[in-house]
Amino acid sequence: MPKNYTLSLAHINDTHSNFEPSKIKFNLSVDGQEYQAETKTGGYARLCYQIETARKKAHDDQQAFLFLHGGDSFQGTLYFREFKGAANAHLLNMLNPDAMVLGNHEIDAGNSPVLAFLNRIEFPLLAGNMDLSQEVTDKEGRLKDHPMLLDYDPQLKCAKVLLKPFYDKKIAIVGITLDQMPLIARPDPDTHFINAIDTTVNTVTMLKQQGIDHIVILSHLGLDQDRELAEKVDGISVIVGGHSHTLQGNFSDLGLSHTEYAEVINHTPIIHASKYAEVLGLAEIEFDVQGKCTAINGDNYFMLDEQVEVSLIPIEANAAKQITPEQIAKVTKQLQSHSGVLGDEANQAVHDTIMRDYRPALNALEEQVLAHIPRDLIHTRLPSKHFPHGSEIAPWVCRSMYKATKLSEPELDFALHNAGGVRQSLNKGNLSVADVLGRILPFELPLVKYQIQGQYLYQVLESSINAATNNGVTGTGAGSFPYTYGIRYFYDGKLEKNQRITLIEEYRQGQWSEIDKDKLYIGVSSAYTAAGKEGYDALLKAHWQQDLHTMTLPEAFVDFVSQHGNLIENPLQPNVYYISHR
């Protein structure tokens, strides 16, 4: 019997159809000068090469190996818009994961796309707290009893579990996803999600009773809820997570996160691997015979191009200065020698499949240039020290929704959109249709106009911010944070609940004035937000709602930018005034 049980683990999460390498920027200090280095990282071909390398090394070292996906393969780029999950299944099969957990974006459009995905994949999809016991038996898109799905067992009140050999024992992989799924996605009405902690407690207890002590929770809960899970449930060997797009590891010398790679709570390490296939998490974990982690060594690894573009910081002040080849070489060397950086080696078969089967459909859209963006516009979901009014892009998206809706609704007062509906920052340079539809606004959601009383705007703004910041409520992530056009609001998170929105003002005839809580206002939001998801439930108190069938969210932004793209270089007046509760 071995004294220690070593697991070699590779993990990714929230890849969101980013099959090709994506752009990334780092900030470095070399010889006392600050530089920005821009290059590309990740993508499925590079992931595949590194996963195969790790798998072979584990085999040669006679160690157990797992490759796990923490959910949210769907959405994110034009690849999903064009191929609706077929490319995701095909390319994930080539990466050969041992399992993937169901993410919220897998079920954005109901159960049918999940069924299509299940019919194509060659690995199990885990959703251990998804209860299908009440699913309509003769429905199209029925998931119950699908051989590739491990869902909830209502008789045992436990997750169905993936068991794999682990030296002289077995290791269990349990998939747990958001129990707030109806608030954040659109599962079919007959599909229910059981409390994540209760399901995990029952499942771990059952496994321990069966003599199975090595238990991996493959989670799509986000880091905050993973922490709660680890704290409240004894006996979890490791949590492999996703949903919160958390980059773990010390990358402070590259201008990025500076956290520990594995956060340990209640003897349980929690590991996440950022987003968009930018990094690969690799770990070697030692467990004792009872399944308790005794040591973990690992990190997240960027997979970078050899070619790096280098600029002096501050970029605007140094725009006219020439950077020398020697400086570029030094910055590139320092970047590529970082302990969390791997090279650009790629699996040729995966690369060729992407280029041959899927890439041609995207090329035409990339050739349709809408505007030239004169500077980088940063999208951050929450306000921060550097961006006190939050996202630089979401307000422009709100303005585009407002302008599109105003054409058919002259009495329109405001636009309201959630931060999670905008997916990426906007880079300086040409903006194409492909950039908008594939990266920035990949969700093809209709716009919905509605009439609502002023008092409910106070409720919806506070509720959505509380949910985004976990301020007295358990939220579903920072994506619910609200951005507006036509109204502005003031939020003080240090005040008592239901008093935190201190003022909402509307913009009329060139000036701001306080809204009347008793008056009716007409607004526009995406269909997702208007459905009351993620803290926006007060929008369901609208006097009426009406779909704008002729206009979707990305179409409104495409139309606006194609006509008014030159305006984007001018900053909008801030509409968000935010004081954190922390």
Image (cartoon, rainbow, N blue to C red):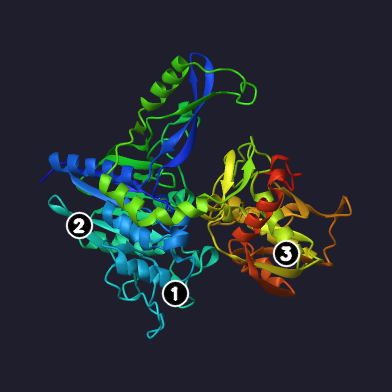
Disc 1 and disc 3: Cα gap in Å? 34 Å
Disc 3 crowd, CA 10 A, few/some/many (<14, 14-19, 20+): many
Identify residue type, mark 1: Thr
Label located before the other in sequence (3 or 2): 2
Q: Nearer the viewer, residue 510 or 197?
A: 510
Label located before the other in sequence (1 or 2): 2
Instruction: Tell me: residue 488, above or below residue 409.
Output: above
Residue for point 34% across, 76% down: 144
Instruction: Tell me: residue 299, above or below residue 395.
Output: above
Residue of label 2: 164
Residue for point 75% across, 75% down: 543
Q: Position of residue 522 (x, y in %)?
A: 77, 66
Q: Is residue 124 left or right of residue 195?
A: left
Residue of label 1: 191
For label 3, the SS is helix
Residue lying at the far left of the rendered structure: 1
Disc 1 crowd, CA 10 A, few/some/many (<14, 14-19, 20+): many
Residue of label 3: 405
Identify residue type, mark 3: Thr
Q: Position of residue 259 (x, y in %)?
A: 45, 35
Residue for point 21% across, 57% down: 212
Q: Nearer the viewer, residue 430 or 511?
A: 430
